[in-house]
Amino acid sequence: MENVLRLTAISIVPILIAVTFHEVAHGFAAYLQGDRTAKSMGRLTLNPIAHIDPIGTVIMPLALLVLTRGKFVFGYAKPVPINPYNFKNPRKGMALSALAGPAMNLIIAIVCGVLFTWVLMPLSGSASPALTARVLSPITGMLAWGVFINLLLAAFNLIPIPPLDGGRVLAGILPARQAYSLEKLERWGFLIVIVLIMTGIAYYFINPLMGFLVAVVDIFTKGQVGYILARGGFGL
């Protein structure tokens, strides 16, 4: 029980940051392209309360965190409203807006990885045991989870099935007829994704994407993140 409470305590902040920034990135990318829908509805804010979905942001990720002992975490926030008809090129605008979410998660993962590698780990090696236990260890844990959760969220959302971001990006790349056929899957999208997860097929998409994203983060962390993940995680 103590380990569950500790895991929950150090992961809740990274989860909230990951899903909040993900959704704001969608809305801000749309805003830059001329769509003010998210801004007019008060969704271009970093206040997580505006984006929290009780099930997707709180219950689901914490349940997965406990049930899988930290091996798989997924969550989502309330989708930011976007009106593609406000874009000069609706298909391109939706693709760029969709891509902004995973891109933001990658940026956050890089920031967390840099702080983890270049700041917290050196400090933990030279600080007093009391300071390490009370302050540095919890912060290090949050940064480590920040890397893992953001990379997993980015990789998962890049699965090319609508309404996931990868599906919207793919729809913006495909010819119009094929894009229309793909978009018709959206009503069944989450059901398809659940089936892919339950059968393990989803990991044929997630694992290569995770590998690529970890390699990007490792450019800034001298391979530290990839090394730790390869050994089975951050030891949290």
Image: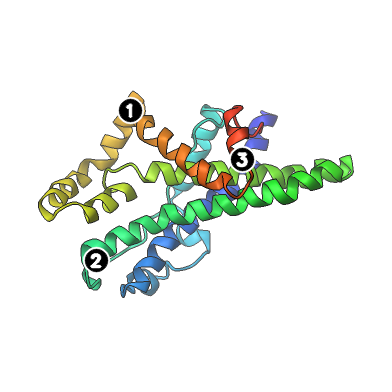
Kindly state the secondary structure of the residue where label 1 is placed: loop
**Screen quadrant of the N terminus:** top right
Position of 179 compared to 232: left or right? left
Kindly state the secondary structure of the residue where label 3 is placed: loop
User: Could you say where residue 94 lies in the image, as x and y percent from the top left?
Assistant: 28, 61
User: Could you say where residue 19 lies in the image, as x and y percent from the top left?
Assistant: 48, 52
Q: Mark 1 and mark 3: span between their CA atoms?
A: 28 Å
Does residue 58 appear in the picture of this structure? no
Please identify, in this view, whether the residue under mark 1 or under mark 3 is nearer the observer.
3
| Residue assigned mark 1 | 201
Which residue lies at the image location 37% right of the left edge and 68% below the top edge?
38
User: Could you say where residue 229 lies in the image, as x and y percent from the top left?
Assistant: 58, 33
- Seen from the viewer's position, the closer of residues 11 and 56 is 11
- Does residue 3 sit above or below 34 in this rendering? above
What amino acid type should be assigned to the residue bearing mark 3? Gly
User: Could you say where residue 90 lies in the image, as x and y percent from the top left?
Assistant: 22, 65
Other-residue count near label 3 (Cα within 10 Å), few / some / many at <14 / 14–19 / ≥20: some
| Residue assigned mark 2 | 84
Does residue 140 appear in the picture of this structure? yes
| Residue assigned mark 3 | 223
Please identify, in this view, whether the residue under mark 3 or under mark 2 is nearer the observer.
3
Q: Mark 2 and mark 1: span between their CA atoms?
A: 31 Å
Which residue lies at the image location 39% right of the left edge and 72% below the top edge?
39
Kindly state the secondary structure of the residue where label 2 is placed: helix
The first of marks 3 and 2 along the sequence is 2
